[in-house]
Amino acid sequence: MSSKSVTQLLQEIEANRQTLNELANSKGLHSEDIIIQSQKLDKLLNRYSTIAN
């Protein structure tokens, strides 16, 4: 994976993390939206973990 792709992935991870925090603040931790966003973030983090190792 190119460094540009890694940078884009890291930016996507950060954007998803911020969205998750905003949702948690507005809807609470047990919202369906939180679960969906958390799963999206998990997939991105798993992808990053695969390429980083």
Image: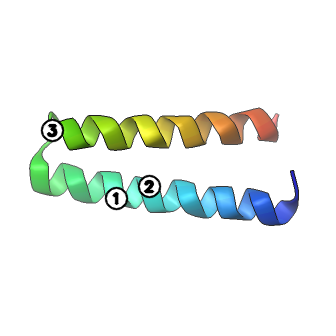
**Place of residue 24 in the rendered image (x, y in percent of width and height, measured from the top left):** 20, 49
Amino acid type for the residue under numbered disc 3: Ser
Question: Quadrant location of residue 29?
Answer: top left
Query: In the image, what residue occupies the spot 19% across and 36% down?
Result: 32
Instruction: Judge the density around disc 3: few (<14), some (14-19), many (≥20) Cα neighbours within 10 Å.
Output: few
Q: Which residue is mark 1?
A: 19
- In-image side of 40 versus 5 (left or right): left
**Place of residue 3 in the rendered image (x, y in percent of width and height, measured from the top left):** 85, 62
Q: Look at the picture and state if 41 lies above or below 20.
A: above
Q: Seen from this angle, which residue lies furthest left?
A: 27
Query: In the image, what residue occupies the spot 15% across and 33% down?
Result: 30
Nearest the eye: 12 or 18: 12
Name the quarter where the C terminus is drawn: top right
For marks 3 and 2, the one nearer the N-term is 2
Q: Which residue is mark 2?
A: 16
User: Disc count in the image?
Assistant: 3
**Place of residue 48 in the rendered image (x, y in percent of width and height, measured from the top left):** 69, 42
Q: CA distance from mark 1 to mark 2?
A: 5 Å
Q: Seen from this angle, which residue lies furthest right?
A: 2
Query: In the image, what residue occupies the spot 72% across and 63% down?
Result: 7
Amino acid type for the residue under numbered disc 2: Asn
Q: Which residue is mark 3?
A: 31
SS at mark 3? loop
For marks 3 and 1, the one nearer the N-term is 1
SS at mark 2? helix
Instruction: Judge the density around disc 2: few (<14), some (14-19), many (≥20) Cα neighbours within 10 Å.
Output: some
> Are the two marked residues, 1 and 2, in contact with CB atoms closer than 8 angstroms?
yes
Amino acid type for the residue under numbered disc 1: Thr
